[in-house]
Image (cartoon, coloured by chain):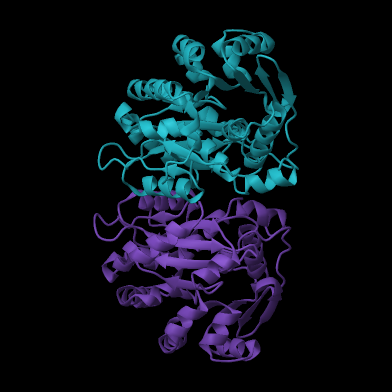
Chain colours: A purple, B cyan
């Protein structure tokens, strides 16, 4: 790969999704909280998988989904994350490269296997995620190619990484390298339970290192321990250059120092699986930011990308997003 | 598992499908024949996979899809096939057991990896299959649990097995064991190019060992080297107890010594991916035969099962087929 500038460099947990349609009753029987992500160990993964109906395997991982979205929109993304040298690792690498994401971290020759997320999709299209982190936990500061980090206009980090001390160090290191090179740092809060687990350090991170913050209603209200979305949003606005906050079917709001823009959700004939909605929304906004688009245009691009991904099974775009946005006259 | 009677025991190539949407131009560029199945080696598989867009992984294998269909219809199927002890092998085993198919062949601890079929789906919903047989080639007569073969009312064999000398021996052995136990033997011809490769031995097999024959138009016309479907069908009728012949959108025809029944194709809102159409049609007919249904009712069940599987991506049912047939007042 040449040394040309990249649009976004994403750092995250490299995961293969194991997606299955299930019932509310199944969630209840296994004591699972609908809509949340929980970390499980290998034994728990095996037990839950055994109980599950036939599934479909497809590449996932929050930041990786976002980078796939940036590529599909016509941007130049790169990804940093850890897989093991195994069949699922090969699938993950193939799918990322095939959509046009630069990905050069060598797969680990030994250690835990490639990460899996058992995603249970209920009839209401909500997804409940059970993640076995596997090889992801070995992401360490040495994995970060500093030259690569400096080449992205924006560095994009997923909050889920915060769950692993090693990865957290890698994460902070990446943020410092990018900032020192005059790049913007973006963070997605990922999950309200993840925010709960790490509220204080997330607050510090947002205040000290984050230029662009992505969160949904539950996450931003959890971060600021607030019952009011408006109050939490105004806090986020004060702490960042841009806060892009999603509100499900209510759309999203983008807040910068000088501007506040509301974006309606794109209409969808049938919501099939909400996995990846936030990831793809972030892809649209990030792509817009790298191209100097207005907040309204960037937000609209995010809404279109999110609408595409929730209209089918799986967390990566199935249709060319650059084609979809062209049709919406976004150029 | 108890010694209770089983409905159908299927023997086939245990394969994980790697499914991707592609263009006619991609097929042309790689010299692929649309609608056909070709065997590829590991190097060819790697080269084609590298050139492919992001894919979705899902369990497949012709006879395995049929057994999954029998289970979904409410029947009791078992499966015999070979996977390697690897991640794709684990996925294959899980998906088969999770839908209710008895599957007890231990995964091979070494040797070639679990089989993959790179399935290219063009916008016209046709699938073009590229199979790396991997661990399948190690299926041998010793793998066949004779007690299990005797427990199925019908033994179901896929024609694709005929491509491997070892598997062919296993296949003939299974047919003899089942016949000696007074069971019926069913065969699916699988692919017209497969029939071309083995015409003479297929003809011998059909005449000497097969009670129920499944084929589509191209396959049956190739088997009898005939330009006329009617002529080929009458030959098949003379050589078997039941010939169940599919004709795509034109439906199917079931021919026994005393009866000839035409079944219309079930209407489908949008044909998405024809992978598994023949496999699921066979499931409906086989299930009907084990329950003593009329040819018309068995054929209708096949049509419903085929319609379900072509209305989505992937070769296994996503909806309960027993539920679907109940709604169609087939009980």
What quarter of the picture does the C terminus of chain A occupy?
A: bottom right
Q: Residue at 45% of width from left, 15% of height from top?
A: B197
Q: Compared with residue B280, is residue A317 higher up or lower down, i.e. above or below?
A: below
Question: At x 48% / y 53%, what residue is drawn?
Answer: A58
Q: Quadrant of residue A231?
A: bottom right
Percent across and percent down for residue A24 are 59, 67
Tally of numbered discs: 0
Q: In percent of the image, x 57 and y 18: which residue is there?
A: B219
Is residue B43 or residue A324 the one in the foreground?
B43
Viewer-side residue, A184 vs A226: A226
Residue B259 visible in this rendered orientation of the protein: yes
Residue A304 in the image: x percent, y percent?
A: 66, 62
Can residue A78 be seen at all in this image of the molecule?
no
Q: In front: A212, or B40?
A: B40
- Residue A59's place in the image compared with A163, above or below, is above
Residue at screen point 43% across, 82% down: A209
Image spot of residue B147 (x, y percent): 38, 33
Where residue A16 appears, as percent x and y from the top left, is 43, 57
């Amino acid at each position: 790969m040449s040394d040309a500038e990249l649009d976004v460099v994403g750092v995250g947990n490299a995961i293969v999704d194991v997606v299955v349609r299930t019932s509310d009753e199944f969630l209840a029987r296994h004591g699972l909280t609908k809509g949340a992500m929980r970390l499980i160990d290998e034994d728990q993964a095996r037990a839950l998988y055994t109980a599950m109906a036939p599934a479909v395997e497809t590449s996932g991982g929050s930041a990786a989904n976002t980078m796939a979205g940036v590529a599909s929109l016509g941007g130049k993304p790169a990804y940093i994350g850890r897989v093991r040298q195994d069949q699922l690792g090969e699938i993950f690498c193939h799918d990322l490269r095939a959509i046009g994401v630069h990905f050069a971290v060598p797969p680990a020759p030994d250690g835990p296997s490639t990460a899996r997320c058992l995603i249970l999709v209920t009839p209401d299209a909500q997804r409940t995620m059970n993640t076995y982190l596997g090889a992801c936990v070995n992401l360490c500061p040495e994995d970060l190619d500093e030259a690569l980090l400096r080449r992205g206009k924006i560095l994009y980090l997923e909050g889920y990484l915060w769950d692993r001390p090693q990865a957290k160090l890698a994460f902070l290191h990446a943020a410092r390298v990018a900032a020192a090179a005059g790049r913007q740092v973006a963070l997605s809060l990922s999950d309200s339970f993840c925010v709960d687990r790490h509220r204080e350090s997330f607050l510090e991170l947002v205040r000290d290192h984050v230029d662009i913050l992505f969160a949904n209603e539950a996450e931003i209200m959890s971060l600021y321990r607030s019952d009011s979305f408006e109050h939490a949003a105004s806090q986020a606005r004060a702490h960042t250059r841009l806060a892009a906050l999603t509100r499900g079917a209510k759309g999203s709001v983008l807040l910068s120092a000088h501007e506040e823009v509301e974006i309606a959700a794109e209409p969808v004939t049938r919501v099939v699986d909400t996995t990846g909605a936030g990831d793809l929304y972030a892809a649209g906004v990030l792509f817009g930011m790298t191209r100097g688009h207005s907040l309204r245009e960037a937000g609209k691009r995010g809404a279109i990308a999110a609408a595409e991904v929730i209209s089918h099974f799986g967390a990566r775009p199935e249709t060319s997003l650059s084609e979809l946005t062209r049709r919406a006259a976004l150029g």
